Image (spheres, helix red, strand yellow):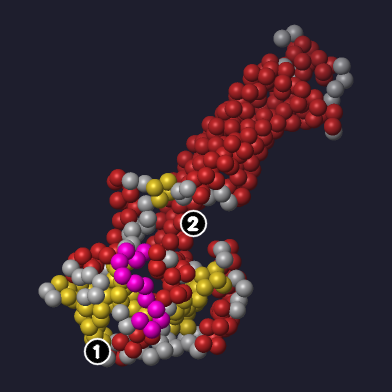
Amino acid sequence: MKLYFQLAWRNLWRNKRRTLIATTSVLFAVILSLITRSMQHGYYDYMIDSAVRLYTGYIQIHSKGYWENRSLDESMVLSESMIQKIRSFPKITTVTPRLETYSLISFQNATKITPVFGIDPVLEDSIIDLKKKIVKGEYLSINSEGMLIAEGLAKLLKVDVGDSVVIYGQGYHGVTAAAQIPIQGIVKFILPALNNATVYLSLPYAQWLYSAPERITSLSIMINNIGELEDTKEFLAMHFSDKYEVMDWAELMPELVQGIEMDNASGIIMLFILYVVIGFGIFGTVMTMTAERIKEFGILVSVGMKKGKLILVAILETMFVSFIGAISGILVSIPLLYYFHVNPIYLTGETAEAILAFGFEPILPFSVKPGIFFAQVSVVFLIAMLSAIYPITVIRKLEPVKAMRK
C-alpha cells in the first residue's frame, strides 16, 4: 500500500503548477466557507447567550400557567433546600430567583408603564454584569429600598439619582402596590428596548412592595454550555411536580429559534455555492490530470499493471489534492478566526440599527468550535470522492492499444 501512496504523491508533483493551482483554489474556497460558517455560528451562539442572560436563562422553572399569563398570581414559593438541591447539580453554574411584573412609573407629569424586576443583586450581576452598566449612583444591595433605573427611562421621566419616583401597580392577588422609591443608580443598556423601560428592585423589597412574601415568578438557570442542556433539564424535571413547568430557552423563545433556522438556511445556500466552486476546482484538475495521462495509463496496463491498482493511485491523487488544500485552508483560518473570536467586529450605521431593533448588541463574533473545521474536511472529502468517479470510469473503459496511440 505504501508504494501506491508514493506513486500518487510523485505523480502530483510531476506538474507542480497544475497541482498548486488546484490546491490554492481549494484553500481559498475553504477559507471563505470557514469564515462564513464561523461568523454565522458565532452570531447564533451570541444571540442565544445574550437572550438567556438578559431574559430567560438556559432553563427556567415557574408555576404551571405562568408563562401564558405572566401574572403575579401565578408566582411560586420554593424552599431554600430545593434551591440548594438545584445548585448542587454539577452542570448548573447559577440559579437566579426573579420576581417580574409591570407597573406604572411616574415623576411629576411624566408617566410610563415599565417592567419591574425584583432581583438578587449579587446573582444578577454574575449573569449580566449589571454593576458594570451603572453610569451614575450606586449598585443595589440585597437590603436596598431604592431602585436602579435604565438611562433612557430616566431621561424620559427627567429624573436623576436621589429623586424619588412613584411606582403604582397590582400586587399578589390584586393587592394595590404603591410606593415612592428613591433612585439609587442609573444603568445604561445598549439595547433600546431595555434602556428605555427597565427598573430593578432588590428581591426582598419587591416581594414586600407587591405583597408577595417569599414568592418568585421564575427561577432562571445557567449552565456550563448548551451541550449539557438536555441532561440538566431531565435532572430538574425529576425533582419538580406537575404544578411546575421546566422549560428550556428554545421553548421560551421560539421566535429566536425560527430566526436562527431561517438565517442558517440562507447560509447553507451560500455554502453550497462555495462547495460548487471547490468541486469544479477539484474536478477540473482531476479531469486534466486524467486526460494528460491517457497514454501513460495505456502503457502501464499493457505492461501488466492491473486496472484496479491504477484506479487506486488515481483516487489517492485526488484525495491528496483535496486534503492539501483543505488542511492548508484550515491552518490559515484558525489564527484569523480566533482573533475575531476574541475581538468581535463592532457594526455601525444602518446594519447596527437593524440589529438593535431586534434586541441584540450590534457586534459580529466568530465561533471556533472544532465541528466547523471538521465539517469542511468532511465535505471536501466527499467532493474528492465524487470527482474520483471520472478517472475511475476512464480507466475501466481504457483500451491499452488505442490509449498508447494518443
x and y, in percent, of residue 346 in the image: 39, 47
Q: Amino acid at mark 1?
A: Thr
Question: Which structural element holds mark 2?
Answer: helix
Q: Toward which corner of the image does residue 213 lie, by quadrant?
A: bottom left
Determine whether, in the image, residue 320 is placed left or right of residue 141: right
Seen from the viewer's position, the closer of residues 400 and 323 is: 323
Name the residue: 72% across, 28% down.
Answer: 317
Please name the residue that numbered disc 2 is placed on.
Answer: 45
Q: Say whether residue 140 is visible.
A: yes
Q: Toward which corner of the image does residue 357 lie, by quadrant?
A: bottom left
The quadrant of the rendering that contains the N terminus is top right
Name the residue: 67% across, 32% down.
Answer: 324
Indicate whether residue 138 is drawn in magenta. Answer: yes
Of labels 2 and 1, earlier in sequence is 2
> From what the image shows, is residue 304 above or below residue 244?
above
Name the residue: 51% across, 70% down.
Answer: 222
Q: Which mark is residue 176?
A: 1
Q: Toward which corner of the image does residue 309 lie, by quadrant?
A: top right
> From what the image shows, is residue 116 above or below residue 401?
below
x and y, in percent, of residue 387 in the image: 64, 31
x and y, in percent, of residue 192 in the image: 29, 60
Determine whether, in the image, residue 202 is placed left or right of residue 85: left
Q: Of all residues shown, which one is farthest toward the right?
A: 304
x and y, in percent, of residue 13 in the image: 72, 21
Seen from the viewer's position, the closer of residues 213 and 163 is: 163
Measured in 3D between alpha carbons, the distance from the residue under mark 2 to the one under mark 1, in whole angstroms, is 41 Å
Seen from the viewer's position, the closer of residues 395 and 226 is: 226
Name the residue: 84% across, 16% down.
Answer: 302
- Residues in magenta, as a range: 133-144
